[in-house]
Image (cartoon, grey):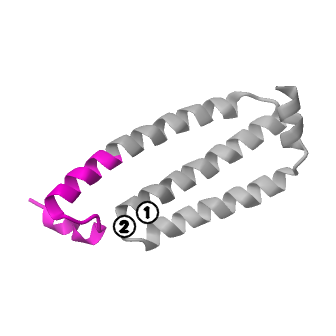
Amino acid sequence: MENTIAQIQTIPLQYYIIFCSALFSIGVAGVLSKRNAIVIFMSVELMLNSANLLLTAFSAYRNDPAGQIFVFFIMVVAAAEVAIGLGLLVVVYRSTKTIDIDVLNRLKW
């Protein structure tokens, strides 16, 4: 465990911040620009994973396990989001034969 923390701490914390900010920005751009629901789900997962990586880096630098506990809860939320989101996507595809989010207007009552 100590060896892993020492390996993480060899990389400056600023590199983690820059890398996670870039990943999060790519995820936000994917959510805002794409019309495909699967790509939007992948972009949300990318944003969650960048937050997980940054929490893990901060946790390792501060020698505090609280960040890693938050990562566990974020992973649980991400798994639930994927399960519910893909279930909804299957239902939408069965009724509209497309996964384009612009076509979802037909699902209104």
Image quadrant of residue 10?
top right
> In the rendered view of the protein, which quadrant contains the C terminus?
bottom left
Residue 24 location (% of width, % of height): 60, 59
Residue on which disc 1 sits: 39
Q: Residues within 10 Å of mark 1 (few under 14, many from 20)?
A: some
Residue 96 location (% of width, % of height): 17, 63
Tell me if 77 is positioned left or right of 102 in this view: right
Q: Is residue 55 magenta?
A: no
Residue 49 location (% of width, % of height): 59, 48
12 up-or-down from 104: above or below: above
Total number of numbered discs in the rendering: 2
The amino acid type found where label 1 is placed reads: Val
Q: Which portion, as a residue range, is magenta?
A: 85-109
Tell me if 71 is positioned left or right of 18 in this view: left
Q: Residue at x 75, y 55 (%)?
A: 17
> In the rendered view of the protein, which quadrant contains the N terminus?
top right
Q: Secondary structure at mark 2?
A: loop
80 up-or-down from 93: above or below: above
Q: Which mark is residue 76?
A: none
Task: Compare residues 39 and 20 and report the one nearer the observer.
Answer: 39
Q: Is residue 91 magenta?
A: yes
Tell me if 54 is positioned left or right of 104 in this view: right
Q: Secondary structure at mark 1?
A: helix
Residue on which disc 2 sits: 36
Q: Residue at x 82, y 30 (%)?
A: 63
Residue 64 location (% of width, % of height): 77, 29
The amino acid type found where label 2 is placed reads: Asn
Q: CA distance from mark 1 to mark 2?
A: 5 Å
Task: Kindly report the secondary structure that dominates the magenta region of the rendered protein.
Answer: helix
Q: Tags 1 and 2 in contact by the CB under 8 Å rule?
A: yes
Task: Compare residues 33 and 92 and report the one nearer the observer.
Answer: 92
